[in-house]
Image (cartoon, rainbow, N blue to C red):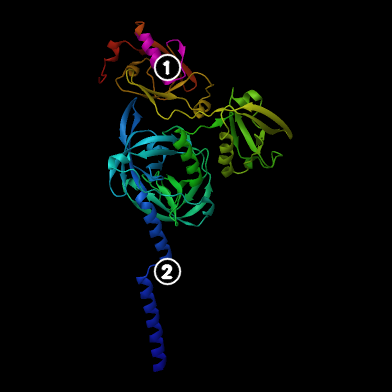
Amino acid sequence: MLNRSRILFFAVSMCCSQLAEAAVDPSQAPGGALAEAVRKARDRVFPTLVHIRPILDLSRGGQKTEALLNGSGVIISKDGLVVTNFHVAGMAKRMICTLADRRRLSAELIGSDAATDLALIRLNLAELGLEQIRCAEFGRMENLEVGDFVMTMGSPLGLTRSLSLGVVSCRERYLPPMTVAGHVPTGLFNTWIQTDAAINPGNSGGPLVDLAGGVVGINTRGYRGAENLGFAIPGDVVQEVVALLSDHGRVTRSEIGLTLQPLKEMTGVLSEASGLLVSSVAPGSPAGQAGILAGDVLLSYDGQPLSAVFDEELPGARRAIAARTVGQEVGLVVSRQGAEHEFRLTTVAWRPPAEQDTELEQWGLTLRELTQEERRRWFLPEGPGVLVTGVRKGGAAAHSRPKLEAGDVLLCVAGDDVTRPEQVGELLDGARRLGRRAAVVVASRGHLEILIALPIDDERQTAKGDPR
């Protein structure tokens, strides 16, 4: 019995000794290899993090005001190129950047792409007496799998140099297009990496990093009110867009005027097992002029078979169409009621919505061009139309009768149709030079067209509480 007790005591002692040794060496303890990998990846990428404080103009109440925000970025070249989100730096007037070693410097915008919510900026290294700086490297996207550990790095809620650990929850998550700046669609041309590593406001633009220390995505989206749901732009899309921004300062895409949707909801209704359903055709577009109709099924584009049965296949098909050269003649094959038809047409430039409002300071108005979605929503045809985004209290527009309101669409000013915000200001200036006391404005409000008298004489503009 005594011998048995001694043997048991010796075995327990040996186990405790081994556990103690493992605790001293993190790489040998349970989970220690992971901790060691996290530390190595951290040390590779942390020195390349950038805390970005963009200063930008926001439109509120019919005028523009400055706002200071928080965001993140990661250095991707030795000469100081930094990739971040469009909604962080794409509309910034200037930027204050803080490096991981707490040195501050400014940066300039090289180019931006709202459609993928990416922007490229360059650090002004000369301010620190530097010619080169340490940079991160992109990881191998083909090696990324669901369940792999990844880290989000950046400045959540302004808390710089933060790291969160999680796994890849889904590698190709489809999300319906969202908007930045309130109206500019984004997420049209990419799926998203879904992760349970925390992505909070301020993380935007920071890197999603694998355990090898490679950047595999750019943190972009979280879900308010949800836990463990964050989304990053895949690294291959980032590299493709960054190359174009670096070379040209912008991304040029082509279009033909089709709105497409996957076939999954039409299973059993349509005979086609592959392709993309044409849900609408823009009037006057190349596709519309060629005779393509809503309800057709697009089978191939410029000789390349295209198909999207499920939602996550749609961004790739959009990207294939957008990648063609503007002005290039392409061939399309569509299926219509079981019969195939061929069309030839010429691509045109895809024109994204204006990113910022135009302020007519003298008149107390902020305006912008209508998006295609807004035209469809309000049943407005192509042609004239400028959206009122704000009316400044005390300004000339605030004294119009009946009063102009945010959401009104200006169709005609002083007898001329308007299609651009700048055109509105030019016509009002012209009416004032002719000595008119007011300009007649035709506006669409809801489903009605109304006439509005907008005072334009100098005496009226400075009356009744105009702060200037």
Instruction: Look at the image and tell me whether residue 422 can be seen.
Output: yes
Category of crowding for the residue at label 1, using alpha-carbon neighbours closer than 10 angstroms: few (below 14), some (14–19), many (at least 20)? some
Disc marking residue 298: none
Query: Looking at the image, can residue 96 be seen?
Result: no
Q: Is residue 173 left or right of residue 98?
A: right
Q: Identify which residue is drawn at 37% across, 70% down.
A: 25
Picture quadrant of residue 205: top left
Q: Which amino acid, by three-letter code, is at mark 1?
A: Gln
Percent position of residue 153, x then y = 38, 50
Along the viewing direction, whichever of 194 and 250 lies nearer the viewer = 250
Query: Does residue 179 belong to the magenta stretch?
Result: no
Name which residue type carries label 2. Answer: Pro
Residue drawn at 64 percent across, 36 percent down: 277
Q: What secondary structure is marked by label 2?
A: loop
Q: Is residue 262 above or below residue 146?
A: above
Q: Tag 1's secondary structure?
A: helix
Q: Which of the two residues, 316 or 240, is positioned nearer the viewer here?
A: 240
User: In the picture, which quadrant includes the N terminus?
Assistant: bottom left
Residues in magenta? 414-432
Outermost front residue: 131
> Residue 461 versus residue 8: which sits nearer the camera?
8
Distance in Å between CA atoms under marks 2 and 1: 68 Å
Which residue is denoted by mark 2 in the rendering? 30
Determine whether 351 is above or below 430 in the image. Answer: below
Residue 423 numbered mark, or none = 1
Quadrant of the image occupied by residue 83: top left
Label 2 CA crowd tier, 10 Å (few <14, some 14–19, many 20+)? few
Query: Picture coordinates of residue 72 (x, y %)?
Result: 37, 44
Please name the predominant secondary structure of the magenta segment in the image. helix
- Asked whether 423 falls inside the magenta stretch, the response is yes
In-front residue for pair 11/42: 42
